[in-house]
Structure formats: C-alpha cells, structure tokens
Amino acid sequence: MLTILFDGVAYGMLLFVLACGLSVTLGLMNLINLAHGAFAMAGGYATVVLVNQLGVPFILSLPLAFLIAAAIGLVMERAIYVHVYRKPHLEQVLLTIGLVFMAVAGTDYVMGSTQVFAHTPDALQGQFHFFGVGIGRYRLLIIAVCGLLALGLQYILTYTRFGSRLRAAVDDQRVARGLGINVNGIFALTFAFGSGLAGLGGALGTEILGLDPTFPLKYMIYFLIVVTVGGTSTITGPFLASLLLGIGDVAGKYYVPKLGAFVIYTIMIVVLIWRPNGLFSRASAK
Amino acid sequence: MVTPSLLRRATESLSARVRWHPLEIIFWLVAFGMIWLMPTRHLILTEIAWLGLFALSLDLIVGYAGIISLGHAAFFGVGAYAAALLAKHELINEPVLALLVAGLAAMVVGFVTSFLVLRGSDLTRLMVSLGVALMLRELANQFGWLTGGADGLQGVVMQPILGYFRFDMFGHNGFIYCLIVLFVLFLGARRLANSPFGLSLVAIKNNPLRAAAIGIPVDRRLVEIYSIAAFYAGVAGALLAQTTAFASLDVFSFDRSADLLLVLIIGGTGYLYGGLIGAILFKLMQDYLSVLTPQYWPFWIGALLVAMVLIGRDRITAWNAPLRDIAAKLDWRAGRRAAAAAEDR
C-alpha cells in the first residue's frame, strides 16, 4: 500500500519535472507546445548515448542531458517558435504536431525503433525496506532530485528578481513590457530552461517510463492533463496535479489492472466537470 | 431604413453563396467520371472518398465552428467498429442501413462528449478530445471478446448493398457506393453551411461573445454541430469498415486525427471542398512518399506541416488566386450580377 504510494509519488514527481516547463511557456506566451515531449526524448537519448557509448557516469549524464535539451530548446525557440506566438492556436497545434512527427521519425532513423535503457549504476538498483515499506533506490533518487528541483523552482519564482519579472510577464504581458521588462528575453530563457527540465526528466525517466521514438506521442496526453488540471499560473498547481496523476495511475494499474489507463481519464473528466478551468487556477486577467 | 435596392443586394449576395458554381459542377462530374475513367484505381479512389468525407466532417467543426480537435478519430472509430460489429453478428445485414446506424452511434458519442469538449479553453478542448479518443481506443482494446482487441475484428462478411450490389474484390461497387454516400452527405453539409444555422456558426467562430450578444445560443449551436460532425465521421469510419470488411484499433489512433488535420489544412478550411481536395492531394503524396521511404514518411508529413505554418497558410492559398480569377470569369451569371449592381448605383 505505502509502496504503491511511494512509487506513485516518484512517478508524479517525474511527470512534474517533465511538464512544468510546458505549463510556464503556456502561461507566459499562451503557446500550445505539443512538441514538449520531444525535448524530453532528446534528454533521454542524450543520457543513453552518453552512458552506454561514451562511458559517462550516470549521475554526471543528468546535468548534461539538461544542458543538451536546453540548448536544443533555445535554438528551436529562436528559430521556429518565435514565429507563431501571435498566431492562432490552430497554427501552433499544426506546427508542433509537425515537429513531433519529425522528431519521432527522425529519432527512429538515427537511433532505431527499439526501446533503449541507460545502464544505471548498481548502487541505484534494487530496493530496501524501511519500516516495512519497500523503497526502490532509483525511485528515491527521483524523488530527491525532483523534490529539490520543485523547491528550487518555487524559490526562484518567489524570491528572485527574475522570478518576479516572470510572474509579472505572466500576469500581464503588455504592462510588463511597458515597465521595461524584456519579455522576449525572459521567454527565451524560460523556454530553454523548461526544455532542459524536460530533458532531465526524460533522462531520469528512461528507467521508469521506457524510451523509444514514440515517447513524445505516448506522453503527450499526460503533459496536457498536468497542465490543464494544474493551471498555468503557479508551480504548485502542476506539482499537485502531477502527484495526483502519478499516484492515480500507479494505484489504478496496480489495483484494477483491467481498467488500465482508465483511471487517469476518469480523474481528468471528473476534474473538468467539477472545475473546467483546472483545479488550481485563479481568475485570469486575460 | 432598408431601401429596396439594399434589400435586393443583400439577398443577391446571400443567394450567390448558395448557387452552384460551374467549377463545383465540373468537380462532381469528374468525380463521378472516375467510375469509368480510372477503373483500375478504384481501391485508392475509395480511400480518397472516405478520407474526404472524414475531412469534411472535421471542416464542419474546425472551419465553421472554430473548435480545434485532436481526437476526431474517436467518432471515425466508433463508426467503423459499429459497422463491422453489425455485419459480423448479422444484426443489420443491409450495408446502407448499417451505415446509418453506425453514423448515429457516433453521433450519440459525439453528443455526450460534446459537453466535455466545449468547456474551457482551446487547450482543454485539445486535451479532452485527445483523451476521449485514447479512452475509446483503450475500451476497444480491453473488450477483446467483442472487438477482437489488438488483432482487430476479423471474419466480417459484408452483404450486398441494397441486396443487389456485391462488394467485389476490385472495389468497383465499393467506390461507387462511397462516392454516392459522399455526394449525398456533401449536399447535406452544403445546405447546412449556407443555412442561417451555418452562418451563425461562422459568427461564433469569429467572435463568440458578440455572437451571444446578437442572440445566437452559442453552446447549443456548438453541441449541435459537434454531434453532426461526429455523425459524418462515423459514416466515414463505417465506409472504411464496410469496404475493407475489417476494423482494428488503428481507427482510433492519434496519427489518424493528426493526419486528418493535415488533410484539411492542405485543402483549406471553411469552404467544404477543402477536405475533399486535401484528401486527394494527401493520398497521392502518401502513395508517393511511402514508396520512397516506407518507414520514415511521417517525417516528411511533419516537415510539410511545419513548412506550411512557417510560410503562412494565407500565402499558400494565394497560389490559387489566378485559378479563382478564371473561376470568376467562368461564372456566366457574374456578368448579370454586376449589371444589377451598376443599376443600383
């Protein structure tokens, strides 16, 4: 029982790291980015190549995965996304679906279509028992890393100058611009950072989520659920939504395996009937 | 004050939309001519016909009502499974009747889910429409005893259409059947789009708030058009199931919904022919690309989508401006209309 809760929390934390970049970019620029999973996949494959072929230690490969995904994100933002901010949502959806298709087929071409794993060090394998609760070492690592990240993000957003500028830009872009805040610069940085986080999540997630070229398609719905249920104005909203989704999914698959993925869809529908604009959204100024 | 000449011009411009343009007549003559012109290509023409119908149904909600959907395959799938199941268990043996029932089944699903889809913002709509399609796929997968699960529904035998016309292996009768269904439903959609109902949808798409202010019941209209589009998609799915005598989980897949968006975008939204023209171009392109790179052709589909958005859809549709000029000259009634307008001034 508690083991399931533990696994669910680990899964949820992972989803949070994967999806929080998406929620910030959505809130900031009103950009629907369905290709977010592609950045996560880039991070995942970066880790696999670094660890398996270049012999980089697993722990060291995580920050590298972050940097690689962030760099790709920065280039993509400046080269492609910047053109569609002011276009209608339909165009954004078309563009990002196109990017997903390209990423899926391109990865298939370069890396092959089979599922791949990164070799994790022995110290991270297996589980130990703590007051009768089975705790996987790898999942403990995930919770530790993601928990620290969530705290760090919350700190940056609440207490730093960059964080207050970001919040100002999310609240009202025009006024923020009028006050001399470089919204475009903030957005490029945030987009890169969010992509980097997705890359880190993808790297951490190879063990749990599995990694193959269809990754961006498979997890698209999860990201969308986290973002819509959690709302886009805070970090805590997506965080709680991810936990809810993670625990719901793991518990559902464990207790009622016949129903499989239904549990999360049911959660999604109930939440939407109850609160159409997301669980934790506040009244938007726009 | 509404002067008689103003009134006449208004009626004139409204009825000009309704009248059949010569190009439209040519389009359908060529389409029916395919029965004799290309008898060896009827199988791919059949695919174009149901894909065109499917894209037409998406056009009704994207091009007219302005709802973006990532899960239109849900209704396509319901229609396909309904038609295959009806035939397999010999509940309704006559294909045309089964087609109607399958469409109605999809319509019911569309009606029920429309209340979920119409809540919230574009993003919520995307998520819910995608979620509904995935959920139905999961359902079809779980109820293996009914649907055949991942293997698909096999052993379906289709009875002759109207009791006379057998589905032959070259797909001749299948193509004629699909084409007639497409034409009849197209007439329905054309009538719908030009009716006050269709005009009110365009008003909602342009500005829901103002549409509500002039007394259009926005939510009700959206539920109605969503259900109708679901019916069309269901019929398209049923046509696929009937002409191939097979239904598999693939009918619900995300790729199908995404490809469909591309089909519609290639052809252009909001004028009904977009889906049909898009279906022709898409199938030809798919045929060509999948021979060139059997495994990686989605890459080029994706590249095309990205290129279309970056170049801008307006600029792409500008290529047919000379064509439209020719079309205007072809319209023999245009001269008469211009004369009437001059007289008013």
Image (spheres, coloured by chain):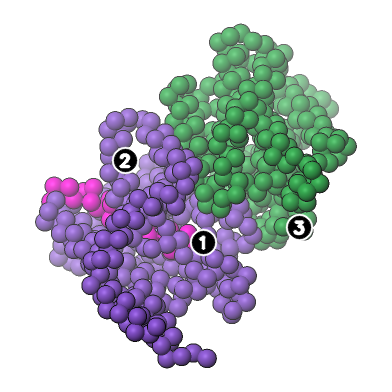
Marks 1/3: CA distance? 23 Å
Q: Residue furthest right?
A: A159
Q: Chain of mark 1?
A: B
Q: Is residue B69 above or below residue B195?
A: above
Marks 2/3: CA distance? 45 Å
Task: Say left or right for B19 vs A145.
Answer: left
| Disc 1 element | loop
Label 2 amino acid? Gln
Q: How many marks overall?
A: 3
For disc 2, the marked residue is: B286
* Disc on res. B291: none
Closer to us: B154 or B80: B80
Could you tell me which residue is drawn at 74 percent across and 51 percent down?
Answer: A174
Q: Is residue B289 something one can see in this rendering?
A: yes
Dot in front, 1 or 2: 1
**Range covered by the magenta-colored residues:** B39-62
Q: Colour of chain B?
A: purple
For disc 1, the marked residue is: B66
Residue B137 in percent (x, y) is at 47, 48
Residue B236 found in image quarter? bottom left
- Same chain under badges 2 and 3? The reply is no
Magenta-colored stretch includes residue B49? yes
- Same chain under badges 1 and 2? The reply is yes
Could you tell me which residue is drawn at 52 percent across and 49 percent down?
Answer: A91
